[in-house]
Image: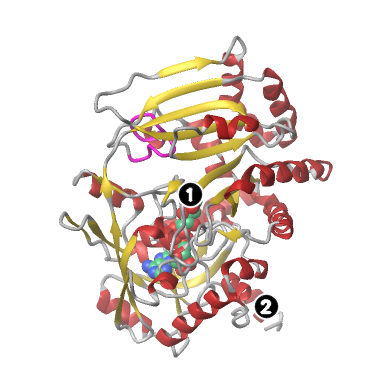
Amino acid sequence: MRRFFRERREKREIAQAVGREGKRRIFSWIHVFRGEAEALIPNDETKLAADIAKGCFSCVGQSHSYNGVQIVPGINAMMMPEGGFKNLSYDPATGIATVGASISVRTCKEFLLTHDRRLLNSGNFMAQTVVGALMTGTHGFGERAVMADAIHALTFLDGNGQRVRLQRGDADFPYVALSFGTIAPIIEIEIETVPTEAFISNSHINRLSKLRELQQGTIASNWCVLPYSDPEDPMMMLHALAHCAVAQRVPEKKSGGGIFAPIARWVIGNYQTLDRFLPMLRRPMQRVLDRLNVKQHTQIQTDPRDLDYLYDPKPGLASERAPDILHGMFSTTYTGYNLAFFVPLEKGPAVVKFIMREADDLRDLGFFLKGIISVREITGTSDVKFAANHREPMAAIDLFADPRDYAWLERLQRLVLQYEPATRPHFGKSALMPEFRSSLGQDNLDRLMNIHRQHYPKANLMFSERVRAFLDVGKPLPGEAAADARLA
Ligand SMILES: Cc1cc2nc3c(=O)[nH]c(=O)nc-3n(C[C@H](O)[C@H](O)[C@H](O)COP(=O)(O)OP(=O)(O)OC[C@H]3O[C@@H](n4cnc5c(N)ncnc54)[C@H](O)[C@@H]3O)c2cc1C
């Protein structure tokens, strides 16, 4: 109880500190990582350059990364979304939009709609800054799924506060376009956009063995399994988009389900609520769903002006539909720690089954995965060096657990890495560990560090402790506990 009130007080203090400079506690999403920093608010470029001259600094976006990549304790933190980099413009001749570092994904999408344009792809949450999202490899699914793949050019300030602009074709561009805080502050990004478009969204409840068959004729897939359903052939929910050949609206279609469908729908709808309080019920509840063996297909045409069509095919925003307090309180977005990584696309189903078996084996120790194991298919390849699909198409695997259980997720990630060394990290959601160096390419990482040293020769840009440890480039900054204990 005391903890509950303390956390509430801390959250209130943070909220009150927004917009004010000075000492502030910064948290990762779900608060698993935190640290005290001196918040600085860059109202404009002159102020930002002057702040850079004040000493060691790092950059913070909306602080929505789960893995603490945005948190460097004890130094100046440039709070980019609170700053004045709110420029947004669109060039109809090139289709390129210019977006300032204080702009959120939602604001950017809303602006693009006024020009009947959209982003090539996006993640399923829109409060993040565009720059923060791009720099950690945020992705959606389908072709050009990694948002950083859409960058045409970017402008950052170097360690002396001088502007540097890099664009596609420049030798350093593919390294800097997704550089997880090692090149900062980026003040402006120029991104490709595409015309708004309607898609046919097909949602299936079926078995994982049917995945490839059900994907026929579609262009982008996002699927998930219930982790405690049949480990041989798990229960799968598939959401796949297809091109929409006709201009007029296609009526909604629904088929299958059977007599147990309403019960299954009710259980699914109420599942998160029970799940929050009774983690041990997750397994039996999923087993019940599994036995009902529901097969269902729903088809819907997306609205070309819908901002979240990739994740919620119904018109309008899922977040704004009916006052759904339960959804807000109990969805994994607000109650679960999310760890993610990428494995080669065709290995996706096997890795998911492996995770299901390993997780199930830990249940006597009290560990239960939360909700679903989600997989977004990232097709094609990207020339951005640290994009998930730089080498080959990948499956993005998302795991959820109670925040107290996040270390179990790290263990599952480590196990996957042992068997599948081509696994690559999500820079905002993976536990960043040295084992990822080989799949990213040590030569690529060395090159990024050389670019970093070239632009920050005074080493005043500090990046995350986790990235420093993962790249093996220097000891962590002494946090208060380490300093007080004379460990550092
Ligand atoms: C509810 C939720 C849903 C999510 N959904 C998805 C999803 O669907 N797909 C997906 O891939 N990810 C998803 N994520 C992860 C999220 O998109 C990334 O972690 C993203 O980085 C968060 O952006 P941010 O603005 O909060 O950046 P932060 O977390 O604050 O920072 C991320 C990194 O960017 C750097 N940075 C920030 N601003 C600048 C700047 N101006 N210049 C240079 N570097 C900068 C920081 O130093 C840090 O290294 C989700 C996260 C949440 C909380």
Q: Amino acid at mark 1?
A: Thr
Residue drawn at point x = 61 percent, y = 30 percent:
210
> Which residue has dot 1 on it?
379
Foreground mark, 1 or 2?
1
Q: Work out whether residue 475 or residue 375 is closer to the camera in this orientation and state it.
A: 375
The residue lying toward the viewer, choosing from 393 and 235, is 393
Q: Which residues are magenta?
A: 307-318
Question: Where residue 75 appears, x then y in whole percent?
Answer: 49, 78
Q: CA distance from mark 1 to mark 2?
A: 44 Å
Q: Are the residues at dot 1 and dot 2 in contact (C-beta closer than 8 Å)?
A: no
Could you say which quadrant of the image residue 82 lies in? bottom left
- Residue at image point 67% right, 67% down: 435
Work out whether 247 lies above or below 445. above
Q: Main secondary structure of the magenta part?
A: loop
Q: How many numbered dots are placed on residues in this image?
A: 2
Q: Which residue is mark 2?
A: 482
